[in-house]
């Protein structure tokens, strides 16, 4: 009890509590923001791994040939026959392979974030309106990001 007869905290005690909360906030906020950036980097790595595995399985089942042309998304998400261009949304007696993915993942980073279509353009050129770069000869798939778009370590996303 103080001299006036009330219970409470002194001004010094309140200032100390506010300072402690400020210190905790200064430590926690930057760590949380780095966590979100790291999550996008991890999502990109995971999406690329899934697509690369799907492309390799496609090639194994089709005599070493990767999906062709602009219909890569259809080639990976529908059933196919022995030829790479025989596609069907439902499994039949002749369409026995696939599907390799439920859906093409959306690019999680960069200016083309949210896009999921493919371009055969050279990596680093950042062709607009496409999420992924795809080379049908080698089966290589990369993020369609400019060389300047990098992770926290300075590694360009288009080299993952």
Image: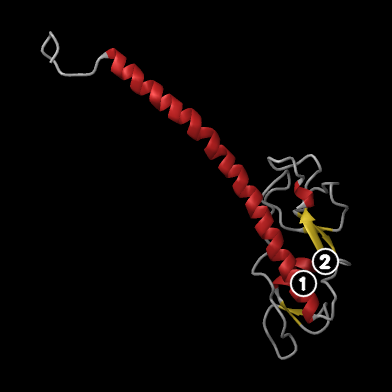
Residue 112 image point, x, y percent: 73, 47
To which quarter of the image does residue 50 belong? bottom right
Residue at the disc numbered 2: 139
Residue 159 image point, x, y percent: 79, 51
Residue 93 image point, x, y percent: 71, 91
Report the residue at 44% width, 30% height from top: 24
> Label 2 crowding class (10 Å Cα cut-off): few <14, some 14-19, many 20+?
some
Say left or right for 1 vs 125. Answer: left
In what element is the residue under mark 2? loop
Residue 75, visible in the rendered structure: no
Report the residue at 71% width, 57% height from top: 116
Is residue 121 positioned above or below 61 on the image? above
Is residue 12 positioned above or below 22 on the image? above
Say left or right for 38 vs 20. Answer: right
Residue at the disc numbered 1: 56
To which quarter of the image does residue 84 belong? bottom right
Labelled pair 2, 1 in contact (Cβ < 8 Å):
yes
> Label 1 crowding class (10 Å Cα cut-off): few <14, some 14-19, many 20+?
some
Badge 2 or badge 1: first in the primary sequence: 1
Say left or right for 31 vs 151. Answer: left
In what element is the residue under mark 1? helix
Say left or right for 2 vs 105. Answer: left
């Amino acid at each position: 009890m103080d001299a006036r007869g009330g219970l409470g905290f002194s001004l010094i005690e309140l200032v100390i509590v506010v300072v402690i909360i400020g210190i905790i906030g200064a430590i926690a906020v930057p760590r949380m923001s780095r966590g979100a950036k790291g999550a996008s980097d991890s999502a990109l790595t995971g999406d690329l791994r899934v697509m690369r595995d799907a492309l390799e399985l496609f090639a194994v089942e089709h005599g070493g040939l990767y999906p062709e042309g602009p219909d890569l998304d259809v080639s990976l998400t529908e059933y196919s026959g022995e030829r790479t261009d025989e596609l069907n949304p439902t499994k039949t007696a002749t369409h026995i392979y696939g599907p390799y993915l439920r859906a093409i993942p959306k690019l999680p980073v960069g200016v083309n974030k949210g896009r999921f279509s493919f371009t055969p353009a050279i990596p680093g050129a950042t062709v607009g309106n496409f999420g992924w770069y795809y080379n049908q000869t080698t089966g290589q798939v990369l993020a369609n990001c400019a060389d300047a778009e990098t992770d926290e370590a300075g590694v360009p996303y288009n080299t993952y």
